[in-house]
Image (cartoon, grey):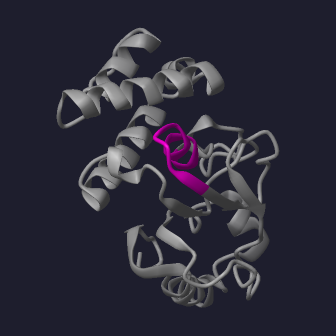
Amino acid sequence: MTAPKRPESYLVTLADLGRDPDEVALLARALAALDAKHALGPKILAEPHVAEIIEEFVTRLQRSFGSLAAVRGKRILDIACGSNSSRSPTTGRRTAQFEPWMCRLLLQLGAEPVGVDLGDLDAEAFEHYALDLGVAGALDALPSASFDAVQDSRLFGSPEFRERHGTANADRVRREISQQERRLLKPGGILIHSDVDG
């Protein structure tokens, strides 16, 4: 994505990811809400990779559902959704790149997102749970076949996860998350994206 110089330019460029005029309008409204509620534009200006993350999430949703409008009313689980206390794996400083952008976007698109992360999600408007995904059985409390879609990404690159669990448990956690994703999806449910194989 080319780097515009003003926050509004980023939002217009991202809205253009819509595949037709209705989807462009839907995405523009969602992005405007994210800007108003979470300062998306200024955060992109400060950290241009945030725009790439939003683009990646929009593309995943389009690929998985066929259109952004199709997520409306869907209960979608985001495992390792990110938080307001997440830190950069390279600098160790707080970063907007690991905020819960997928859940926020889903909420603005009319979905019913559920976020799972160990970090701070207290101020978020979507349903969320503070769970340590490195602990066996962390997702057991979520009911089976209760989600229309599941997505997970960035858990294994998370400084918080690596700090708590190192790399020794990564294979066990990958296996468990893979099993949990299958258990949590409704019949015919969609796996939007998973890093458990990566």
Classify 142 as above or below 153. Answer: below
Q: Residue furthest front?
A: 73
Q: Quadrant of the C terminus?
A: bottom left
Q: State the residue at coordinates (50%, 41%).
A: 105
Image coords of residue 143 (percent x, y): 67, 81
Q: Look at the image and tell me in which quarter the N terminus lies.
A: top left
Measured along the vertical axis of the image, is residue 147 above or below residue 4? below
Is residue 56 shown above or below 32? below
> Measuring 75% from the left and 66% from the top, which residue is drawn there?
163
The picture places residue 138, in percent across and down from the top left corner, at 74, 80
The magenta segment is: 102-113
Q: Nearer the viewer, residue 101 or 107?
A: 107
Is residue 120 one of those drawn in magenta?
no
Whole-percent x, y for residue 190 in the image:
38, 71
**Residue in the foreground of this view, choosing between 112 and 135:** 112
**Residue 165: image location, x then y, percent:** 74, 76
Q: Quadrant of residue 101?
A: top right
Relative depth, front residue between 4 and 37: 37
| Viewer can see residue 70 | yes
Q: How many dots with numbers?
A: 0
Q: Is residue 176 left or right of residue 67?
A: right
Quarter-wise, where is residue 60 in the image? Answer: bottom left
Residue 194 sits above or below residue 19 on the image: below
Which residue corresponds to the image point at 57% horizontal and 41% vertical from the top-left?
Answer: 104
Q: Residue furthest left?
A: 20
Whether residue 154 is visible, yes or no, is no
Left or right: 110 as drawn, with respect to 163:
left
Query: From the viewer's perspective, is 120 left or right of 23?
Result: right
